[in-house]
Image (cartoon, helix red, strand yellow):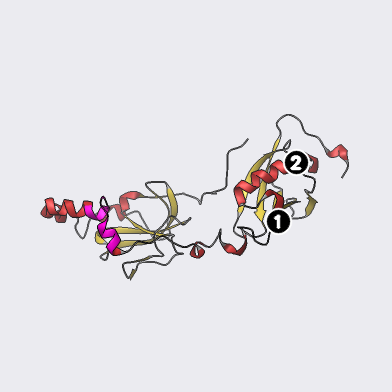
């Protein structure tokens, strides 16, 4: 590659798509300064995908999916390879024992989940169950009167299965999978949501009743007043501000 291709001025930057050899679902648009060294690019990518700098090889592809170059010289600036907006950096992890291998960063079913026994939970103070029991004991009639079979039914009028939605608190996004009563949980109307990310508590089955089907830890049953439907596209968890 001729040195005449090196043309870097000021704080020029480029927006590149990043993919990974082990993480098949990983894809992110990341902005890089053309003045960054290849080593600095690797350090930035390490924070995003988990592959160590010493085990990382980077390939550059153009927008027609043709390979342009191997970014083999850690001391060269990124601009030396003349990347353009829309080009792709492909990260290759050379470490067979890397944290990115074996699907651990993509398949949450491989992660050991924290659980607590019913006996241990009962012994804990300050839980929601204890708080609810206290409210019921203080005024059981008022509590029962508030939660009726038609509780929040009116708020479900504009919520349909298949709608994109955002759930508060936290602005968690997903798709509506169920709208209706859920007697196994509590009286009134509920909305079943499949989150885009594993922010949920189940796979659509609650207390032995299957309300909908979704991946493990992506499901949640929430009250309709917590759900806003509309144009809520899936967020890119790796997207960052421009430098």
Give the total of numbered labels: 2
Residue 84 visible: no
Can you say which quadrant of the picture contains the N terminus? top right
Label number found at residue 78: 2
Q: Residue at x 77, y 44 (%)?
A: 74
Region in magenta: 119-130
- Residue 122, position as x, y percentages in the image: 25, 59
Q: Which percent across, then down, holds residue 131?
A: 22, 51
The structure residue drawn at horizontal position 31% and vertical position 49%, both measured from the top left corner, is: 225
Residue 68 in sight in this render? yes
**Residue at the spot x=79%, y=51% of the render?**
70
Task: Give residue 118's position: percent from left, percent from top.
Answer: 29, 64
Residue that appears at 73% across and 29% down: 10
Badge 2, how many Cα within 10 Å: few under 14, some, many 20+?
Answer: many
The residue most toward the top is 10
Q: Which residue is mark 1?
A: 92
Of discs 1 and 2, which sits in the foreground? Answer: 1
């Amino acid at each position: 590659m001729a040195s005449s291709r090196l043309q870097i001025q000021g704080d020029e930057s480029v927006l590149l798509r990043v993919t990974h050899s082990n993480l098949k679902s990983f894809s992110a648009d990341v902005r890089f300064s053309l003045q960054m060294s290849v080593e600095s690019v690797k350090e930035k990518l390490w924070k995003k995908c988990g592959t160590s700098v010493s085990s990382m090889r980077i390939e550059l592809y153009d927008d027609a999916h043709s390979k342009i170059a191997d970014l083999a010289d850690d001391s060269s600036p990124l601009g030396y390879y003349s990347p353009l907006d829309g080009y792709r950096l492909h990260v290759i992890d050379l470490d067979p024992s890397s944290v990115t291998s074996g699907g651990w960063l993509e398949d949450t079913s491989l992660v050991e989940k924290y659980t607590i026994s019913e006996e241990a939970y009962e012994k804990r103070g300050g839980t929601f169950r204890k708080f609810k029991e206290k409210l019921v004991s203080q005024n059981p009639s008022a509590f029962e009167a508030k939660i009726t079979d038609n509780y929040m039914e009116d708020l479900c009028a504009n919520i349909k299965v298949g709608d994109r939605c955002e759930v508060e608190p936290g602005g968690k996004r997903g798709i509506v999978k169920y709208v209706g009563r859920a007697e196994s949980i509590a009286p009134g109307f509920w909305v079943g949501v499949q989150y885009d990310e594993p922010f949920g508590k189940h796979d659509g089955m609650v207390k032995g009743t299957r309300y909908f089907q979704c991946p493990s830890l992506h499901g949640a049953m929430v009250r309709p007043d917590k759900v806003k439907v509309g144009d809520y596209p899936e967020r890119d968890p790796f997207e960052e501000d421009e430098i």
